[in-house]
Image (spheres, rainbow, N blue to C red):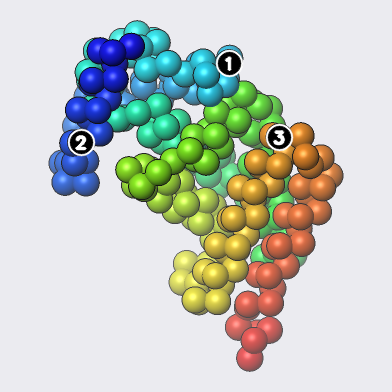
Amino acid sequence: MPAETKVEASAARATRSDSPPLTERQEARRRRILHASAQLASRGGFDAVQMREVAESSQVALGTLYRYFPSKVHLLVATMQDQLEHMHGTLRKKPPAGETAAERVAATLMRAFRALQREPHLADAMVRALTFADRSVSPEVDQVSRQTTAIILDAMGLENPTPEQLSAVRVIEHTWHSALITWLSGRASIAQVKIDIETVCRLIDLTTPEESA
């Protein structure tokens, strides 16, 4: 444990914002790490994701793992972004049905929610990491937010949203994450989550140019 703490502290001090793009080999290594993280979290949740086990499972040195992800929270938030990116690809192959943008977004978010529902330990680990994230994890948290926004905008069919529409998207995103937390903690049923998502998605119809003109 002391050795891991020393490596983690050293890696956390490194600046990653100026890092050059990953090479093909580095990207493959990163994907192995994210896959190992998701597999461990799926089996045992947040506590099951131990950095040493992730390193062994992904066949990278512990120090190398920490250069990619300075802490378990960084890793699990990045895992959430990766899972959302995968969901986005699936959703693009089979777009949601719905006559209005609000209906399509609600259907999309419920499909994403049910995908997470099938992996409750993984969902809990990722949401806990997002909750624990401090300023040092801002780049990873921002990636999660951008991915969620992209999923919602795709469902809306918008490439150039207005400021009002972006504001509605942010409220929808906050509600969706909050719904995940309340469901994972046993304080909300799937039926209640669906009602909340459908209700907040009606904000979209209130911000369309036709409605506001």
Residue corresponding to mark 2: 13
Label 3, label 1: how far apart the Cα atoms are? 16 Å
Q: Nearer the viewer, residue 43 or 70?
A: 70
Residue 52: percent from left, percent from top:
35, 12
Amino acid tagged 3: Ser
Residue visible at 68% across and 84% down in the picture? 211
Query: Dot 2 lies on which element?
Result: helix
Q: Nearer the viewer, mark 3 or mark 1?
A: 3
Q: Residues within 10 Å of mark 1 (few under 14, many from 20)?
A: some
Q: Residue furthest bottom?
A: 213
Residue corresponding to mark 3: 185
**170 in relation to 181, above or below:** below
Residue corresponding to mark 1: 44
Amino acid tagged 1: Gly
Residue visible at 50% across and 76% down in the picture? 162
Precedes in sequence: disc 2 or disc 1: 2
Residue visible at 76% across and 47% down in the picture? 193
Residue visible at 61% across and 47% down in the picture? 177
Q: Are marks 3 and 1 in contact (CB under 8 Å)?
A: no
